[in-house]
Image: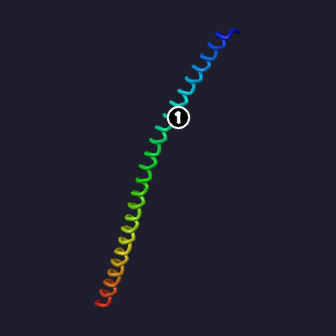
Amino acid sequence: MTISELEVNTIDLHAKYEAAFAHLEEQIDQKDVDLEHLQETIDKLGEQVYHLEDENERLKEEHQRLREDEEAERERLEALVVAFKEVR
């Protein structure tokens, strides 16, 4: 092998190395973009969970209030029934 063949081989190997390196950089850049999108999705889902937890808490409180109202109404009706029985 002559020096010029070595130079050609070296240049060829260097070009292949540069191409492979550029390809890896492109892949890394694409992974970075993908990660950013995934992080945005995670952030949005986290926000949705936060709002759903708030809504769930509100519904629990409303349900509890309705149960208390029903209990008060039941007691009122029971007292009314007792009063009617006493009147008879």
Point 38% across, 68% down: residue = 63
Task: Give residue 7's quadrant in the image.
Answer: top right
Point 49% across, 41% down: residue = 35
Q: Find residue 10 and report its horizontal and vertical position in percent.
A: 63, 17
Point 42% across, 57% down: residue = 50
Check the image and report above or below for 72 versus 24: below
Task: Give residue 62's quadrant in the image.
Answer: bottom left
The residue closer to the viewer here, 62 or 67, is 62
- Label 1: which residue? 28
Q: Pick the quarter of the image with the N terminus.
A: top right
The residue closer to the viewer here, 8 or 81, is 8
Check the image and report above or below for 72 versus 86: above
Check the image and report above or below for 70 versus 33: below
Task: Give residue 64's quadrant in the image.
Answer: bottom left
Check the image and report above or below for 39 versus 53: above
Q: Find residue 27 and report its horizontal and vertical position in percent.
A: 52, 31
Secondary-structure class at tag 1: helix
**Callout 1, which amino acid?**
Ile
Q: Pick the quarter of the image with the C terminus.
A: bottom left
